[in-house]
Amino acid sequence: MSTPLSPVTQQVNVTPHYETITGVIERLTFHSEESGYTVARLTRSRSTDLTTIVGSFANIQPGQTFQLTGFWREHPQYGPQFQVTNYKETKPATLTGIEKYLGSGLIKGVGPVTAKRIVAHFGLETLDIIENQIDRLIEVPGIAKKRIKLIKNAWSTQKAIKEVMVFLQSHGVSTTYAVKIYKQYQDNSIATVTSNPYQLATDIYGIGFLTADKIARNLGVPTDSEFRYCAGIIHALTEAAEDGHCYLPQPELIEKVIKLLATDDHQPAPEAIADIIKQMGAKEELIREIVRGNDGEKLLLCYRPTFFHTEMNLARMICRRLSLPIVQDMPRVRAWIERFTTSRKIQLSLQQQQAVEKAAYSPVMVLASSRVF
């Protein structure tokens, strides 16, 4: 299988024109099992030319019939492509289509030969028979009960994937995210997203709080949901970490969370946020550390557990290193530096020489650099 096509580097339209096309997958140029990213060739009705489609699919095989929504774009190397934003699988309408669909490898236990026998026996009713009376496959020569069980399990899996994708797309979840959600939760996807869509921000790379919050609104999750408050608190601490802070004082955290969660019709109360922080602390979803400020007053610091334990372990490691005896053998250190710089043809400045010497005999050293722009 060839490598994926390179991304489009030019945008033809600022606002793409969306349309819907239907066709049968002829072959896969590329498909990633992990991300679902797919490049495929599609045969459209009343057309002999193959159409290149690009998008994310939870599961896709040649022979499947899809109704695809998306827009056209011009790839500078590969020409016109249809970028899929949403899709829905439909049943093949012809005997040839049904036979190709069943024999594509999508349904474990059914290959091209078996598919031909099944379609020859049941005709256009084949898919309805498999859906509602699958035990009737015993009527087909060469199919035993053991294989029927295998086919039944595979068909149920495909049906579950369809249900998940339809559910997610009907609630405004893009195909890219829908594929990631299905890969993460499998048959539990609908239950997980319905019960707590904010879990997506924790479990799935690329889905942050803002995306999870949008999905939650589409699902009708209340703006004062405890799940939403908890996710907002974690998001605020994560953003602080990206700015270089291991923690936030509770008053500052509450202020940031209120700003994050406020909507036109809802303003979180500081007391409500403080209560959630306390509950998260009791469940060890958040660490609260009491310290004394410069004025002697108690100050409550809020950490994500990962940041807290990392900071504590770093402090212990530094303390251990500082307790080690210092052995200075400067003649040996300088001789080594001389050999190394000579062999590499490096000329150190006085400050660089002093920094290397200090690093050689110091148990702990912090080297800070500044850049002038």
Image (tube, helix red, strand yellow):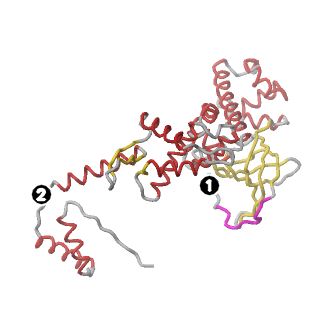
Q: Quadrant of residue 219?
A: top right
Count of numbered marks: 2
| Towards the viewer: 164 or 373 | 373
Q: Residues within 10 Å of mark 1 (few under 14, many from 20)?
A: few
Q: Residues within 10 Å of mark 2 (few under 14, many from 20)?
A: few
Q: Position of residue 173 (x, y in %)?
A: 68, 44
Pointer 1 residue = 2
Q: Is residue 10 magenta?
A: yes
Above or below, 231 against 194 in this view is below
- For label 1, the SS is loop
Residue at 69% across / 51% down in the picture? 55
Q: Earlier in the sequence, mark 2 or mark 1?
A: 1
Prevalent SS, magenta region:
loop
Nearer the camera: disc 2 or disc 1: 2
Above or below, 56 against 337 in this view is above
Residue at 75% across / 44% down in the picture? 87
**Type of amino acid under label 1:** Ser
Magenta region: 7-16
**Type of amino acid under label 2:** Pro
Residue at 19% across / 66% down in the picture? 360
Q: Quadrant of residue 162?
A: top right
Q: Position of residue 345 (x, y in %)?
A: 27, 80
Pointer 2 residue = 325
